[in-house]
Image (spheres, helix red, strand yellow):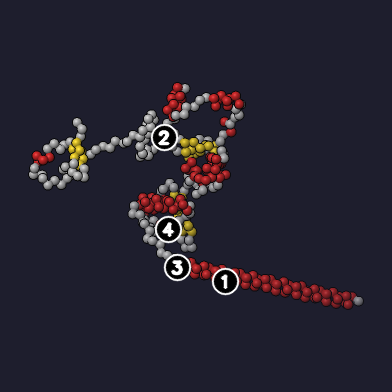
Amino acid sequence: GKRKASALDAALAKFQKVQQSAAQIQIDAANTREKSSAGAKAERLRAMAEAEAAERRERERAAQSNAPREPPRNVPNSILMKQKRVLDLLNTTRANFTVAELHNELGFSCSDPELWDMLIHNPKIQQGVHERRTRMEPTISYKPKHVFEGRREMLELVTKMHDGVLMDDVTDAYPDAVDDCEALIAEGLVLMLTNAETRERVLYPVDERYECEVDDDMATLFHAVPIPEHDNEFDAALRKAGHEPAPRRAARPTGHDSEDEGGGRKRARAKKKRKVNFERMKVTNAHLPELFKGLENITALDQHGASSHKAK
């Protein structure tokens, strides 16, 4: 009986070993099939990507060949104008450009040592590096004074500036910053004041400490004070109260005739008459000087040769 039991145990152990070997073979076969299928799938994807890239290059080549030729660019001769062209491109695109890319976009080379030195030392331009396969190429891009993105970060910046920040510096951060800034002003989240001396617009944060409620009696008294309509009367009232009015920006002349405040008649600008320069005229009777006596007071000659004299 013991020999029979030991024989059965040996046969069972042998069977289990064969079964484990068969299971391992099945697992290895499955892994091999999975790897082969994954490799084949990756190979198919790579082939499809290469075919799409080749087709795209072919379309671009055909489009370039069929596209009308661009007119020759107006290349500036001045190095300052070249610097301005580069700065305008960087400000418009807000992208990094290498020397070769600048050449393609602008039509002139920026590799001139004098021009490149001006660019990299410009406070509105910052340097960078573009990594190629075999080398590192220097790049330049636009450099705003304040770096932020979006209306929320703009509000955070103005809130930190208790003494105010120039609106031009804020709107220079990104292309659509002007619209966001005007929206914040319209919503009353920031205040915009104009400097009386420099005429620059300054943004200030809204300080809740200065917000207070006024009762109706105080508001009625405030609105009951008469305000002069004309600027001269308003300035005189301020000085009478002991306050010096802020300087106003002078109106830019339009070139048209102005009107008097009283009668409303237009004042014609007096034209200064110019003397006739006989020395520059081609005179045929120069040998007869007595003909030109008494012509010192002549101011003009009309088309018929008649002269006009100064009034004594």
Q: Which mark is residue 47?
A: 1
The quarter of the displayed image where residue 300 is located? top left
Q: Residue at x 67, y 71 (%)?
A: 34
Question: Do residues under tags 2 and 4 come within 8 Å of each other at their CB atoms?
Answer: no
Whether residue 276 is visible to the viewer of this picture, yes or no, is no
SS at circle 3:
helix
Residue designated by label 3:
66
**Residue 117, horizontal then vertical, whole percent:** 38, 51
User: Disc 4 or 1, which lies upstream in sequence?
Assistant: 1
SS at circle 2:
loop
* Cα separation between marks 2 and 1: 70 Å
Q: Name above or below for residue 235 compared with residue 114.
A: above
Q: Nearer the viewer, residue 55 or 144?
A: 55
Q: Nearer the viewer, residue 234 or 88?
A: 234
Does 73 sit left or right of 276 as displayed?
A: right
Residue designated by label 4:
105
Q: Which mark is residue 249?
A: 2
Does 16 sit left or right of 218 as displayed?
A: right
* Cα separation between marks 2 and 4: 41 Å
| Mark in front: 1 vs 3 | 3
| Mark in front: 2 vs 4 | 2
Question: Do residues under tags 4 and 1 come within 8 Å of each other at their CB atoms?
Answer: no
User: Disc 4 or 3, which lies upstream in sequence?
Assistant: 3
* Cα separation between marks 1 and 3: 29 Å
Q: How many callouts does the rendering have?
A: 4
* Cα separation between marks 4 and 3: 20 Å
User: Disc 2 or 3, which lies upstream in sequence?
Assistant: 3
Amino acid found under the numbered disc labelled 2: Arg
Amino acid found under the numbered disc labelled 3: Asn
